[in-house]
Amino acid sequence: MNFSLTVLGTGGSAGLPQIGGADGAGDWGACDPAEPRNRRSRASVVIGAPEGNLLVDTGPEIRLQLTSQRIARIDAVLFTHAHADHIAGFDEIRILNRLLGAPMPAYADAACWAELHQRFDYAFKPWSGNGFFRPVLAERVVAAGQIVPILGLPVQLLDQDHGFMRSLGLRIGNLAYCTDVVRFAPEAFAALRGVQTLVIDCFTRGGPHPTHAHLAQVLEWVEALRPARTILTHMGPDMDFRSLCDALPAGIEPGYDGMVIEGV
């Protein structure tokens, strides 16, 4: 199984820098603004599959993310959950429809579809087949625990506790992408065993967070799973890139926007 993963965004729900700062140019928290890898858009990835590109989540910067990485076409979309930082770029699907020339195959669980229908009701009206002036989706309802064939890849969906809601993690072969998770049920954690590349939510270096994993927790998960490579994502304003590189154990690294993992 050969595919690639492009990390479009590695930031938390407010991105980095956050709006504000003494001069209005942004609040960087504890992160060095001179380090370009500290500039983070909202968490999203594209999986380069045998039969096309799978976009995971449509955050608010999705247009800029895709154009900066020169990804000219998306062939399917998967939503991990319905928080705004993962769906606010939903309307950009209409441009992706035009490039695809068809309704967009889209995957989400029933709870996420219910939220999408409520927030973007205009997108779910009957489609006449005459152009794409709004997003048009070919809905696929999926559930945690399933292995779903998407663009020639078997995508195993994992149940994740995101504090006040559930989210979906993904395992494809020896790679897992698990954003927006604070706890794993035993069966979901067991499904991660044997993973060699783990892209994992790690919002803060501080203590426990109600909805996201923190660094000490991720280190415990890594100790149990022992992946060859762990890449941190969905990072908050205390997660400075260079200081993390200097402090993290071998095999664990902060991700950055535009990172590409080839030949997974």
Image (cartoon, grey):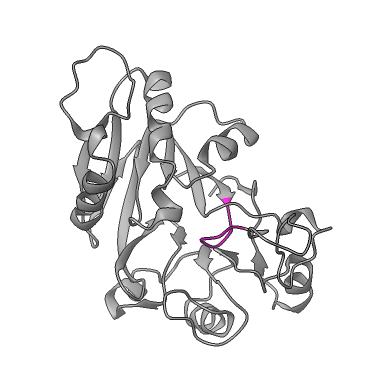
User: Nearest the camera: 227 or 68?
Assistant: 68
Tell me, yes or no, if residue 51 can be seen here.
no
Compared with 137, 78 (above or below) is: below
User: Nearest the camera: 161 or 19?
Assistant: 19
Main SS category, magenta section: loop
User: Nearest the camera: 38 or 263?
Assistant: 38
Res. 178 image quadrant? bottom left
Rendered residue at 49%/80% (across/down): 221
Tell me, yes or no, if residue 129 can be seen here.
yes
Whole-percent x, y for residue 219 in the image:
56, 81
Q: Residue furthest bottom?
A: 207
Does 217 sit left or right of 253 as displayed? left
Rendered residue at 41%/71% (across/down): 181
Q: Residue furthest left?
A: 126
Q: Which residues are magenta?
A: 9-15
Does 112 sit left or right of 22 as displayed? left
Q: Quadrant of the N terminus?
A: top left
Res. 179 image quadrant? bottom left
